Image (spheres, rainbow, N blue to C red):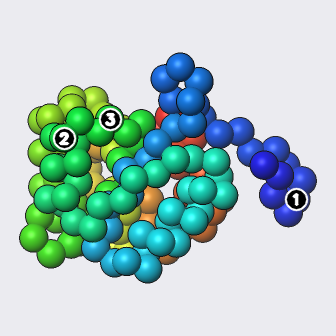
């Protein structure tokens, strides 16, 4: 895919050379939709969950995405609790938290627990692409 500045975008591949899959977890339907559109434009596959509980159940049911993009603030099970549960189910699964605000102390604690990073909302295609590439290599 080529962007407006004619730079080539390389999409990380998942196992066996397939497109990488991102589990998008956000309680806001519009945010999920826009994120999925961005991921599609970037060449990624995606699966969506509308809350932490749904994300955990999706993982428990056997989905093994290459990356989880997880909103922090959601009703019910929030992103921090979902991150911890998902990591119990699949240790080492790459997780990026997305948030409109970040508490530096909480971020440091989560990074010490193995969180792969935080992407501030709202994000643009370029920043989302860069963060995913950083995590997936």
From the viewer's perspective, is 64 left or right of 79?
Answer: right
**Residue 57 x/y as whole percent:** 16, 49
Q: Helix, strand, or loop for circle 3?
A: loop
Which label sits in the foreground, 2 or 3?
Answer: 2
**Residue 5: mark in rendering:** 1
- Give the residue displayed 12% in from the left and 35% down from the top: 88
- Give the residue displayed 12% in from the left and 45% down from the top: 85
**Residue 14 x/y as whole percent:** 51, 29
- Give the residue displayed 17% in from the left and 49% down from the top: 56
From the viewer's perspective, is 137 left or right of 116?
Answer: right
As drawn, the residue found furthest toward the right would be 6
As drawn, the residue found furthest toward the top would be 16
Residue behind mark 3: 64
Of residue 104 and residue 95, the one placed in the foreground of this image is 95
Which label sits in the foreground, 1 or 2?
Answer: 2
- Give the residue displayed 65% in from the left and 39% down from the top: 11
**Residue 61: mark in rendering:** 2
Q: Is residue 40 above or below residue 124?
A: above
Give the CA separation, mark 2 to mark 3. 9 Å
């Amino acid at each position: 895919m080529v962007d407006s500045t004619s730079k080539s975008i390389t999409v990380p591949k998942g196992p066996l050379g397939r497109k990488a899959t991102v589990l998008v977890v956000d309680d806001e339907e519009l945010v999920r939709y826009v994120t999925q559109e961005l991921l599609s434009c970037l060449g990624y596959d995606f699966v969506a969950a509308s809350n932490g509980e749904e994300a955990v159940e999706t993982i428990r049911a056997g989905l093994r995405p290459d990356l989880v993009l997880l909103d922090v603030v959601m009703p019910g099970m929030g992103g921090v609790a979902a991150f911890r549960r998902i990591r119990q189910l699949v240790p080492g699964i790459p997780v990026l938290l997305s948030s409109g605000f970040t508490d530096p102390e909480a971020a440091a604690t989560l990074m010490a627990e193995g969180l792969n990073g935080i992407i501030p909302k709202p994000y643009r295609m370029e920043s989302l692409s860069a963060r995913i590439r950083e995590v997936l290599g």
